[in-house]
Amino acid sequence: MKHTQVAGGVVLNSRGEVLITNRSNTSWSLPKGHIEDGESAREASVREIWEETGVNDLVFVRDLGSYDRYRTSLDGGDDPSELKTIHMFLYTTPQMELAPTDSDVHPEAVWVSREKVSELLTHKKDKEFFDGLVF
């Protein structure tokens, strides 16, 4: 089994809405992705948020910690071929326009109310992580 380090963020706009992203029209998640060689977790989170949503005007608020989960399978469950340690950070942004730069993989990013985030996230561990946050 492959074990990868991943970083991403919970991004809030001025209305308090949360940014989520669609992957290959099969799943919804908070923006995140693999940490590249020589990159810190926070640097990777900023890069991944920009690639998946087009948001690049980010204000760092705080580290939200990390959690482990398997890769998301096509049916929304666990794919045990890859275990991910996901490092998450909280950001705010004045930027409202969304334009994923890797739209072939992430065709859509949307702002949603905090109350709707958990019902839209595909992976149960992502839902548990988000539901446990205080912000």
Image (cartoon, helix red, strand yellow):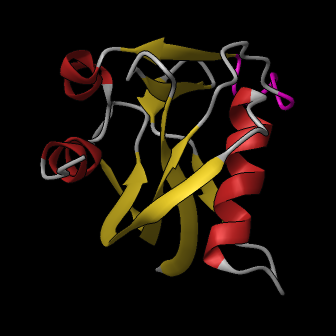
Going 86% across and 29% down the picture, which residue do you hit? 101
Q: Quadrant of residue 73?
A: top left
Q: Is residue 49 left or right of residue 125?
A: right
**Looking at the image, can residue 88 be seen?**
no
On the image, the x and y values in percent for residue 72 come to 40, 46
Front-most of residues 3 and 17? 17
Q: Would residue 87 be visible to someone looking at this image?
A: yes
Q: Based on the displayed image, in which of its 4 quarters is residue 83 positioned?
A: bottom left
Left/right of residue 20 with respect to residue 34 in the rendered view: left
- Where residue 51 sits: x, y (%)? 79, 40
* Residue range highlighted in magenta: 101-107
Q: State the image coordinates of residue 4 (x, y, percent, origin top left).
A: 56, 76
Residue at 56% x, 67% y is 6
Above/below status of 93 relative to 109: below
The prevailing secondary structure element of the residues shown in magenta is: loop
Label tally:
0
Reply yes or no: does residue 78 show up in magenta. Answer: no
Where is residue 126 shown, x and y percent of the image?
A: 29, 47
Q: Residue at x 57, y 50 (%)?
A: 32
